[in-house]
Amino acid sequence: MRALPRHLPSSSELHGVRWLRSSYSTGANNCVETACPDVPPWAGLLAVRDSKAPAGPALLFSFRSWAEFTAAVDRM
């Protein structure tokens, strides 16, 4: 089985996803946005991109990895 990519060169490769920002975000575009693609091969992963560069790259995480990351940040 081939490993899934951990990033995409352009988040525009994720067609039809809804990108969301944190409710804590300001209007200054200084945050990240997340999306849950439902199309193979990215279904079941969480995509993360920089709100300042919406056509730029997207990082892909498993839901478990993202939950562990956000929990670690919360403990800081």
Image (cartoon, rainbow, N blue to C red):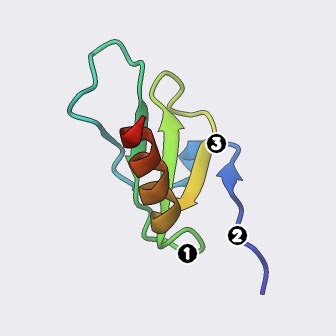
Of 23 and 43, nearer the camera is 23
Is 7 situated above or below 63? Answer: above
Q: Which residue is mark 2?
A: 4
Left or right, 53 with respect to 7, comes to: left
Q: CA distance from mark 1 to mark 3?
A: 16 Å
Q: Residue at x 39, y 55 (%)?
A: 17
Residue topped by disc 1: 40
- Residue 37 visible within the image: yes
Looking at this view, is 45 or 66 the one in front?
Answer: 66
Residue located beneath label 3 in the image: 10
**Amino acid type of the residue that numbered disc 2 sits on in the rendered structure:** Leu
Give x and y (percent) for residue 59: 60, 48
Compare marks 2 and 3 and give the one earlier in the sequence: 2
Q: Amino acid at mark 3?
A: Ser
Crowd around label 1: few <14 · some 14–19 · many ≥20 (10 Å): few
Give how far across and how far down residue 76 sits, in percent. Answer: 42, 34
Q: Residue furthest top?
A: 28
**Quadrant location, the N terminus:** bottom right
Vertical relation: 28 (above or below) 52: above
Asked whether residue 15 appears in the rendered view, the answer is no
Report the label total: 3
Q: Residue at x 45, y 28 (%)?
A: 51
**Amino acid tagged 1:** Pro
10 Å crowding of disc 3: few (<14), some (14-19), many (20+)? some
Which numbered disc, 1 or 3, marks the residue that appears first in the sequence?
3
Q: Secondary structure at mark 3?
A: loop
Mark 2 or 3: the one toward you: 2
> Residue 15's x, y, as percent?
48, 55
